Image: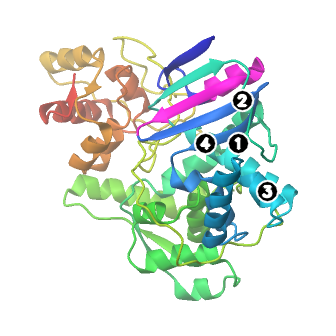
Protein backbone atom coordinates (compact mmCIF):
# COMPACT_ATOMS: atom_id res chain seq x y z
CA UNK A 1 0.00 0.00 0.00
CA UNK A 2 1.44 3.37 -1.04
CA UNK A 3 1.94 5.93 1.73
CA UNK A 4 3.14 9.47 2.33
CA UNK A 5 4.39 10.70 5.69
CA UNK A 6 6.37 13.57 7.15
CA UNK A 7 6.54 16.47 9.58
CA UNK A 8 4.13 19.38 9.27
CA UNK A 9 7.01 21.82 9.87
CA UNK A 10 8.39 20.67 6.49
CA UNK A 11 5.17 19.95 4.58
CA UNK A 12 2.27 21.85 6.14
CA UNK A 13 -1.20 20.38 6.58
CA UNK A 14 -2.45 22.91 4.03
CA UNK A 15 0.06 21.55 1.49
CA UNK A 16 -0.99 17.98 2.27
CA UNK A 17 -4.66 18.87 1.64
CA UNK A 18 -3.80 20.50 -1.69
CA UNK A 19 -1.66 17.53 -2.73
CA UNK A 20 -4.38 14.98 -1.92
CA UNK A 21 -7.22 17.13 -3.27
CA UNK A 22 -5.62 17.89 -6.62
CA UNK A 23 -4.89 14.18 -7.17
CA UNK A 24 -8.33 13.07 -5.89
CA UNK A 25 -6.69 10.48 -3.68
CA UNK A 26 -8.50 7.89 -1.58
CA UNK A 27 -7.21 6.63 1.74
CA UNK A 28 -6.74 7.53 5.39
CA UNK A 29 -4.88 10.63 6.60
CA UNK A 30 -3.58 10.49 10.18
CA UNK A 31 -2.58 13.80 11.81
CA UNK A 32 -0.84 13.79 15.20
CA UNK A 33 0.26 16.51 17.57
CA UNK A 34 0.79 14.99 20.99
CA UNK A 35 -1.63 14.26 22.63
CA UNK A 36 -4.11 14.92 19.77
CA UNK A 37 -4.54 12.28 17.04
CA UNK A 38 -7.06 12.58 14.19
CA UNK A 39 -8.00 10.03 11.51
CA UNK A 40 -9.55 11.49 8.35
CA UNK A 41 -11.15 9.16 5.81
CA UNK A 42 -10.69 10.56 2.31
CA UNK A 43 -12.53 9.43 -0.80
CA UNK A 44 -11.58 10.85 -4.21
CA UNK A 45 -10.24 14.08 -2.70
CA UNK A 46 -13.13 14.56 -0.24
CA UNK A 47 -13.12 14.15 3.54
CA UNK A 48 -16.01 11.81 4.35
CA UNK A 49 -15.53 11.22 8.10
CA UNK A 50 -13.18 12.12 10.93
CA UNK A 51 -12.39 10.83 14.40
CA UNK A 52 -10.43 12.67 17.08
CA UNK A 53 -9.37 12.09 20.68
CA UNK A 54 -10.26 15.70 21.55
CA UNK A 55 -13.52 15.91 23.57
CA UNK A 56 -14.54 19.16 21.85
CA UNK A 57 -14.42 17.42 18.44
CA UNK A 58 -16.67 14.48 19.28
CA UNK A 59 -19.78 14.48 17.11
CA UNK A 60 -22.12 14.35 20.10
CA UNK A 61 -20.54 17.48 21.56
CA UNK A 62 -21.49 19.49 18.46
CA UNK A 63 -25.15 18.52 18.91
CA UNK A 64 -24.96 19.69 22.54
CA UNK A 65 -23.23 22.95 21.56
CA UNK A 66 -25.94 23.77 19.01
CA UNK A 67 -28.75 23.01 21.46
CA UNK A 68 -30.11 20.20 19.31
CA UNK A 69 -29.70 17.51 21.97
CA UNK A 70 -29.08 17.33 25.70
CA UNK A 71 -26.07 15.58 27.18
CA UNK A 72 -28.39 12.80 28.42
CA UNK A 73 -29.81 12.23 24.92
CA UNK A 74 -26.29 12.01 23.47
CA UNK A 75 -25.24 9.47 26.13
CA UNK A 76 -28.29 7.32 25.37
CA UNK A 77 -27.62 7.50 21.62
CA UNK A 78 -23.98 6.51 22.21
CA UNK A 79 -25.10 3.39 24.08
CA UNK A 80 -27.41 2.44 21.21
CA UNK A 81 -24.60 3.09 18.72
CA UNK A 82 -22.30 0.63 20.48
CA UNK A 83 -24.97 -2.07 20.65
CA UNK A 84 -26.08 -1.65 17.02
CA UNK A 85 -22.50 -1.20 15.68
CA UNK A 86 -23.34 1.87 13.63
CA UNK A 87 -22.29 5.51 13.68
CA UNK A 88 -23.91 8.11 15.91
CA UNK A 89 -25.39 10.14 13.07
CA UNK A 90 -27.28 7.13 11.72
CA UNK A 91 -28.60 6.28 15.20
CA UNK A 92 -29.96 9.81 15.61
CA UNK A 93 -31.62 9.77 12.19
CA UNK A 94 -33.15 6.29 12.58
CA UNK A 95 -34.37 7.09 16.09
CA UNK A 96 -36.26 10.14 14.77
CA UNK A 97 -34.44 12.34 17.25
CA UNK A 98 -33.39 14.62 14.38
CA UNK A 99 -34.10 14.83 10.63
CA UNK A 100 -31.34 13.21 8.58
CA UNK A 101 -30.64 16.49 6.76
CA UNK A 102 -29.97 18.26 10.08
CA UNK A 103 -27.67 15.43 11.18
CA UNK A 104 -25.77 15.68 7.88
CA UNK A 105 -25.17 19.41 8.44
CA UNK A 106 -23.61 18.75 11.84
CA UNK A 107 -21.46 15.89 10.52
CA UNK A 108 -20.16 18.20 7.77
CA UNK A 109 -19.53 20.93 10.35
CA UNK A 110 -17.56 18.47 12.51
CA UNK A 111 -15.38 17.41 9.57
CA UNK A 112 -14.80 20.99 8.39
CA UNK A 113 -13.87 22.50 11.78
CA UNK A 114 -11.74 19.55 12.90
CA UNK A 115 -9.68 19.62 9.69
CA UNK A 116 -9.34 23.42 9.69
CA UNK A 117 -8.01 23.25 13.26
CA UNK A 118 -5.04 21.15 12.03
CA UNK A 119 -4.17 23.62 9.25
CA UNK A 120 -2.81 25.91 11.99
CA UNK A 121 -0.37 23.33 13.36
CA UNK A 122 3.30 24.11 12.94
CA UNK A 123 4.50 21.02 14.79
CA UNK A 124 3.23 17.47 14.39
CA UNK A 125 3.31 14.55 12.00
CA UNK A 126 1.15 13.26 9.17
CA UNK A 127 0.73 9.89 7.48
CA UNK A 128 -1.40 9.14 4.45
CA UNK A 129 -2.14 5.53 3.58
CA UNK A 130 -3.55 5.19 0.07
CA UNK A 131 -6.12 2.54 -0.75
CA UNK A 132 -9.81 1.82 -0.69
CA UNK A 133 -11.52 2.64 2.59
CA UNK A 134 -12.76 -0.28 4.69
CA UNK A 135 -16.47 -1.00 4.56
CA UNK A 136 -18.04 1.75 6.64
CA UNK A 137 -20.53 1.22 9.42
CA UNK A 138 -24.03 2.54 8.66
CA UNK A 139 -23.79 6.33 8.75
CA UNK A 140 -25.26 9.57 7.42
CA UNK A 141 -23.20 10.27 4.27
CA UNK A 142 -21.20 13.51 4.16
CA UNK A 143 -18.32 14.73 1.99
CA UNK A 144 -16.31 17.97 1.92
CA UNK A 145 -13.77 18.77 -0.78
CA UNK A 146 -10.19 19.09 0.49
CA UNK A 147 -9.68 21.96 -1.95
CA UNK A 148 -12.63 23.86 -0.47
CA UNK A 149 -11.19 23.34 3.01
CA UNK A 150 -7.90 24.80 1.83
CA UNK A 151 -9.71 27.86 0.40
CA UNK A 152 -11.68 28.35 3.61
CA UNK A 153 -8.46 28.24 5.67
CA UNK A 154 -7.06 31.03 3.48
CA UNK A 155 -10.27 33.06 3.93
CA UNK A 156 -9.93 32.80 7.70
CA UNK A 157 -6.28 33.91 7.74
CA UNK A 158 -7.08 37.66 8.22
CA UNK A 159 -9.41 36.75 11.08
CA UNK A 160 -6.67 34.79 12.86
CA UNK A 161 -4.30 37.73 12.39
CA UNK A 162 -6.89 39.97 14.06
CA UNK A 163 -7.24 37.49 16.93
CA UNK A 164 -3.46 37.47 17.43
CA UNK A 165 -3.31 41.27 17.39
CA UNK A 166 -6.09 41.68 19.92
CA UNK A 167 -5.25 38.65 22.10
CA UNK A 168 -1.45 38.19 21.97
CA UNK A 169 -1.22 36.14 25.17
CA UNK A 170 -3.28 33.56 27.05
CA UNK A 171 -3.13 35.19 30.49
CA UNK A 172 -5.31 38.12 29.38
CA UNK A 173 -8.37 38.95 31.43
CA UNK A 174 -11.39 41.06 30.50
CA UNK A 175 -13.49 43.83 32.01
CA UNK A 176 -17.24 43.56 31.41
CA UNK A 177 -19.15 46.74 30.54
CA UNK A 178 -22.57 46.00 32.01
CA UNK A 179 -24.39 48.78 30.13
CA UNK A 180 -23.15 47.52 26.76
CA UNK A 181 -23.96 43.93 27.75
CA UNK A 182 -27.51 44.92 28.72
CA UNK A 183 -28.03 46.44 25.27
CA UNK A 184 -27.18 43.14 23.51
CA UNK A 185 -30.08 40.93 22.28
CA UNK A 186 -31.30 38.31 24.74
CA UNK A 187 -31.17 34.58 24.13
CA UNK A 188 -27.50 34.17 23.15
CA UNK A 189 -26.57 31.42 25.60
CA UNK A 190 -23.09 30.95 24.11
CA UNK A 191 -22.34 34.61 24.85
CA UNK A 192 -23.88 34.21 28.30
CA UNK A 193 -21.65 31.21 29.08
CA UNK A 194 -18.54 33.11 28.01
CA UNK A 195 -19.51 36.18 30.05
CA UNK A 196 -20.23 33.96 33.06
CA UNK A 197 -16.70 32.50 32.89
CA UNK A 198 -15.13 35.94 32.48
CA UNK A 199 -17.15 37.35 35.39
CA UNK A 200 -15.76 34.51 37.49
CA UNK A 201 -12.21 35.68 36.77
CA UNK A 202 -11.33 33.28 33.96
CA UNK A 203 -8.40 34.26 31.76
CA UNK A 204 -8.51 33.78 27.99
CA UNK A 205 -6.84 30.42 28.50
CA UNK A 206 -9.46 29.48 31.08
CA UNK A 207 -12.30 30.26 28.68
CA UNK A 208 -10.64 28.19 25.95
CA UNK A 209 -10.26 25.23 28.31
CA UNK A 210 -13.69 25.29 29.91
CA UNK A 211 -15.90 26.17 26.94
CA UNK A 212 -15.99 23.25 24.49
CA UNK A 213 -16.84 25.16 21.32
CA UNK A 214 -14.21 24.95 18.59
CA UNK A 215 -11.37 27.41 19.07
CA UNK A 216 -12.19 29.56 16.02
CA UNK A 217 -15.80 29.91 17.19
CA UNK A 218 -14.66 31.01 20.67
CA UNK A 219 -12.15 33.56 19.43
CA UNK A 220 -14.73 34.95 16.99
CA UNK A 221 -17.32 35.38 19.76
CA UNK A 222 -14.87 37.05 22.19
CA UNK A 223 -13.52 39.29 19.41
CA UNK A 224 -17.09 40.28 18.51
CA UNK A 225 -17.79 41.29 22.11
CA UNK A 226 -14.59 43.34 22.30
CA UNK A 227 -15.51 45.13 19.08
CA UNK A 228 -19.01 45.82 20.43
CA UNK A 229 -17.60 47.31 23.64
CA UNK A 230 -19.05 44.57 25.85
CA UNK A 231 -15.54 43.44 26.88
CA UNK A 232 -12.29 45.34 27.36
CA UNK A 233 -9.00 43.47 27.26
CA UNK A 234 -6.83 43.74 30.39
CA UNK A 235 -3.10 43.11 29.88
CA UNK A 236 -1.01 41.81 32.82
CA UNK A 237 1.73 44.25 33.80
CA UNK A 238 5.42 43.44 34.10
CA UNK A 239 8.13 45.17 36.11
CA UNK A 240 10.37 45.95 33.13
CA UNK A 241 9.85 49.46 31.66
CA UNK A 242 10.67 48.13 28.17
CA UNK A 243 8.17 45.28 28.49
CA UNK A 244 5.60 47.76 29.83
CA UNK A 245 6.08 49.94 26.72
CA UNK A 246 5.79 46.88 24.48
CA UNK A 247 2.52 45.84 26.14
CA UNK A 248 1.16 49.37 25.90
CA UNK A 249 1.82 49.25 22.16
CA UNK A 250 -0.14 45.98 22.03
CA UNK A 251 -3.05 47.61 23.87
CA UNK A 252 -2.96 50.56 21.49
CA UNK A 253 -3.27 48.12 18.58
CA UNK A 254 -6.29 46.50 20.23
CA UNK A 255 -8.05 49.85 20.64
CA UNK A 256 -7.10 51.18 17.20
CA UNK A 257 -10.14 51.06 14.85
CA UNK A 258 -7.75 50.61 11.93
CA UNK A 259 -6.95 47.12 13.22
CA UNK A 260 -10.60 46.06 13.26
CA UNK A 261 -11.48 43.57 10.55
CA UNK A 262 -14.60 41.70 9.57
CA UNK A 263 -14.46 38.19 11.01
CA UNK A 264 -15.96 35.46 8.83
CA UNK A 265 -18.53 33.61 10.90
CA UNK A 266 -18.19 29.84 11.33
CA UNK A 267 -20.21 27.98 8.72
CA UNK A 268 -22.86 26.60 11.02
CA UNK A 269 -26.23 25.22 9.97
CA UNK A 270 -28.62 28.17 9.77
CA UNK A 271 -31.63 26.41 11.25
CA UNK A 272 -29.96 25.36 14.48
CA UNK A 273 -31.02 27.15 17.69
CA UNK A 274 -28.41 28.52 20.11
CA UNK A 275 -26.96 25.96 22.55
CA UNK A 276 -28.47 25.74 26.04
CA UNK A 277 -26.61 26.06 29.32
CA UNK A 278 -26.52 22.57 30.81
CA UNK A 279 -24.94 21.74 34.15
CA UNK A 280 -24.33 18.15 32.98
CA UNK A 281 -22.04 19.24 30.17
CA UNK A 282 -18.51 17.80 30.63
CA UNK A 283 -15.79 20.38 31.28
CA UNK A 284 -12.45 18.53 30.99
CA UNK A 285 -9.31 20.64 31.06
CA UNK A 286 -7.71 20.11 27.67
CA UNK A 287 -3.94 20.17 27.22
CA UNK A 288 -2.66 23.34 25.57
CA UNK A 289 -1.85 23.08 21.90
CA UNK A 290 1.48 24.51 20.63
CA UNK A 291 1.55 27.88 18.84
CA UNK A 292 -1.00 28.93 16.23
CA UNK A 293 -1.42 29.84 12.57
CA UNK A 294 -0.17 32.98 11.07
CA UNK A 295 2.10 34.74 13.45
CA UNK A 296 2.37 34.98 17.16
CA UNK A 297 -0.48 32.73 18.10
CA UNK A 298 -2.10 33.18 21.47
CA UNK A 299 -0.31 30.02 22.56
CA UNK A 300 -1.80 27.58 20.14
CA UNK A 301 -0.50 26.16 16.84
CA UNK A 302 0.37 28.25 13.65
CA UNK A 303 0.94 28.04 9.93
CA UNK A 304 4.67 27.77 9.23
CA UNK A 305 6.01 30.94 7.65
CA UNK A 306 8.24 28.81 5.43
CA UNK A 307 11.38 26.80 5.32
CA UNK A 308 14.87 28.15 5.69
CA UNK A 309 15.24 31.14 3.41
CA UNK A 310 19.00 31.56 3.35
CA UNK A 311 22.27 31.10 5.14
CA UNK A 312 24.60 33.74 6.43
CA UNK A 313 24.10 36.96 4.40
CA UNK A 314 22.19 39.56 6.46
CA UNK A 315 18.91 40.74 4.90
CA UNK A 316 18.24 44.22 3.52
CA UNK A 317 16.75 46.44 6.24
CA UNK A 318 13.42 47.24 4.59
CA UNK A 319 12.67 43.83 3.04
CA UNK A 320 9.14 42.62 3.74
CA UNK A 321 8.32 38.92 4.19
CA UNK A 322 5.20 37.59 2.52
CA UNK A 323 2.28 37.46 4.89
CA UNK A 324 3.29 40.61 6.79
CA UNK A 325 1.04 43.61 7.20
CA UNK A 326 0.70 46.22 4.41
CA UNK A 327 3.71 48.47 4.39
CA UNK A 328 5.91 45.85 6.03
CA UNK A 329 6.72 45.30 9.67
CA UNK A 330 8.27 48.75 10.09
CA UNK A 331 11.55 47.29 11.39
CA UNK A 332 14.16 49.93 12.11
CA UNK A 333 17.62 49.16 10.69
CA UNK A 334 20.22 48.87 13.44
CA UNK A 335 22.75 51.61 13.99
CA UNK A 336 26.22 50.51 12.86
CA UNK A 337 28.34 49.09 15.71
CA UNK A 338 30.79 51.53 17.15
CA UNK A 339 33.62 49.02 17.16
CA UNK A 340 34.77 46.40 14.68
CA UNK A 341 34.67 43.37 17.06
CA UNK A 342 30.98 44.00 17.84
CA UNK A 343 30.17 44.35 14.14
CA UNK A 344 31.92 41.09 13.28
CA UNK A 345 30.23 39.31 16.18
CA UNK A 346 26.77 40.36 14.92
CA UNK A 347 27.57 39.23 11.37
CA UNK A 348 28.83 35.86 12.61
CA UNK A 349 25.78 35.09 14.72
CA UNK A 350 23.35 35.85 11.85
CA UNK A 351 24.47 32.71 10.02
CA UNK A 352 23.71 30.51 13.03
CA UNK A 353 20.59 28.32 13.19
CA UNK A 354 19.12 28.51 16.72
CA UNK A 355 17.48 25.40 18.20
CA UNK A 356 15.18 25.10 21.20
CA UNK A 357 16.73 23.12 24.05
CA UNK A 358 13.40 22.95 25.90
CA UNK A 359 9.90 22.15 24.62
CA UNK A 360 8.36 25.40 23.40
CA UNK A 361 5.53 25.45 25.94
CA UNK A 362 7.99 25.05 28.84
CA UNK A 363 10.30 27.72 27.45
CA UNK A 364 7.37 30.15 27.11
CA UNK A 365 6.43 29.59 30.73
CA UNK A 366 9.99 30.33 31.87
CA UNK A 367 10.39 33.55 29.83
CA UNK A 368 7.70 36.13 30.62
CA UNK A 369 9.04 38.98 28.47
CA UNK A 370 6.72 39.52 25.46
CA UNK A 371 9.74 40.15 23.22
CA UNK A 372 11.49 36.94 24.30
CA UNK A 373 8.28 34.93 23.86
CA UNK A 374 7.79 36.43 20.40
CA UNK A 375 11.29 35.36 19.32
CA UNK A 376 11.01 31.90 20.90
CA UNK A 377 7.93 31.19 18.76
CA UNK A 378 9.95 31.95 15.61
CA UNK A 379 12.68 29.38 16.37
CA UNK A 380 11.95 26.22 14.39
CA UNK A 381 15.41 24.68 13.92
CA UNK A 382 15.50 25.71 10.25
CA UNK A 383 15.52 29.51 10.20
CA UNK A 384 18.87 31.21 10.61
CA UNK A 385 19.26 34.24 12.83
CA UNK A 386 19.22 36.34 9.65
CA UNK A 387 15.84 34.81 8.71
CA UNK A 388 14.44 35.59 12.17
CA UNK A 389 15.65 39.19 11.96
CA UNK A 390 13.54 39.54 8.81
CA UNK A 391 10.28 38.75 10.58
CA UNK A 392 10.58 40.30 14.06
CA UNK A 393 9.35 43.90 14.52
CA UNK A 394 12.40 45.18 16.38
CA UNK A 395 15.92 46.42 15.56
CA UNK A 396 18.45 43.73 14.56
CA UNK A 397 20.86 44.54 17.37
CA UNK A 398 18.14 44.25 20.00
CA UNK A 399 16.86 40.94 18.57
CA UNK A 400 20.41 39.51 18.54
CA UNK A 401 20.93 40.49 22.17
CA UNK A 402 17.64 38.81 23.11
CA UNK A 403 18.78 35.65 21.30
CA UNK A 404 22.08 35.75 23.16
CA UNK A 405 20.18 36.13 26.43
CA UNK A 406 17.99 33.11 25.63
CA UNK A 407 21.13 31.12 24.82
CA UNK A 408 22.78 32.23 28.08
CA UNK A 409 19.66 31.12 29.97
CA UNK A 410 19.99 27.65 28.46
CA UNK A 411 16.72 27.81 26.51
CA UNK A 412 18.21 27.81 23.00
CA UNK A 413 21.42 26.70 21.31
CA UNK A 414 23.06 29.02 18.80
Tell me the crowding category of disc 1: few under 14, some 14 to 19, or many 20 or more residues within 10 angstroms, Cα based.
few
| For marks 3 and 4 on the same chain, the one whose residue lies earlier in the sequence | 4
User: Which residue is nearer to you in this view: 73 or 32?
Assistant: 73
- Spatial CA distance of label 2 from label 1 is 23 Å
Please give the range of residues in magenta. 14-34
Mark 2 against mark 1, which lies toward the viewer? 2
Query: On screen, 183 above or below 292?
Result: below
- Quadrant of the frame with the C terminus: top left
Q: Earlier in the sequence, mark 1 or mark 4?
A: 4
Left or right placement of residue 59 versus residue 356 in this view: right
Q: Is residue 82 left or right of residue 242?
A: right
Pointers 3 and 4 in contact (C-beta within 8 Å): no
Q: Which numbered tag is attached to residue 42?
A: 2
For marks 3 and 4, give the CA distance.
16 Å
Task: Say whether disc 2 or disc 1 marks the residue closer to the N-terminus.
Answer: 2
Q: Which comes sooner in the sequence, label 4 or label 2? A: 2
Q: Residue at x 60, y 53 (%)?
A: 58
Q: CA distance from mark 3 to mark 2?
A: 20 Å
Instruction: Tell me if residue 30 comes above or below residue 82 in the rendering.
Output: above
Foreground pick, 307 / 138 = 138
Which residue is disc 3 drawn over?
103
- Please state if 120 lies on the left or on the right of 266 as rendered: left
The reply to whether residue 62 is in sight is no
Give the labeled residue for mark 1.
155
* Residue labelled with disc 4: 51
Residue in the image at 22% along x and 29% along y: 357
Q: Is residue 395 left or right of residue 99?
A: left
Looking at the rendered structure, the secondary structure element under dot 3 is: helix
Residue 141 visible here: yes
Amino acid sequence: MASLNGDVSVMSVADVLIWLGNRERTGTLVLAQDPIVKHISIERGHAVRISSVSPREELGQFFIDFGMLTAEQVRHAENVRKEADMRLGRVLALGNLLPEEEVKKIVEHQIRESVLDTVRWDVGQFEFHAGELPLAKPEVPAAISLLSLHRLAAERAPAWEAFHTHFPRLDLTFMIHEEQLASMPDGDVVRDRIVHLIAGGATLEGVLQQELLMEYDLYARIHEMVQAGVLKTIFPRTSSPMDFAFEMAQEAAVDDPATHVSIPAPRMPSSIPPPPMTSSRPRPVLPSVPPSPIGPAPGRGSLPVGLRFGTSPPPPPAKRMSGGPPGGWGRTPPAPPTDEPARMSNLAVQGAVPHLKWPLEEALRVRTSPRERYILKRIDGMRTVADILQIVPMPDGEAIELLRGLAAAGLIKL
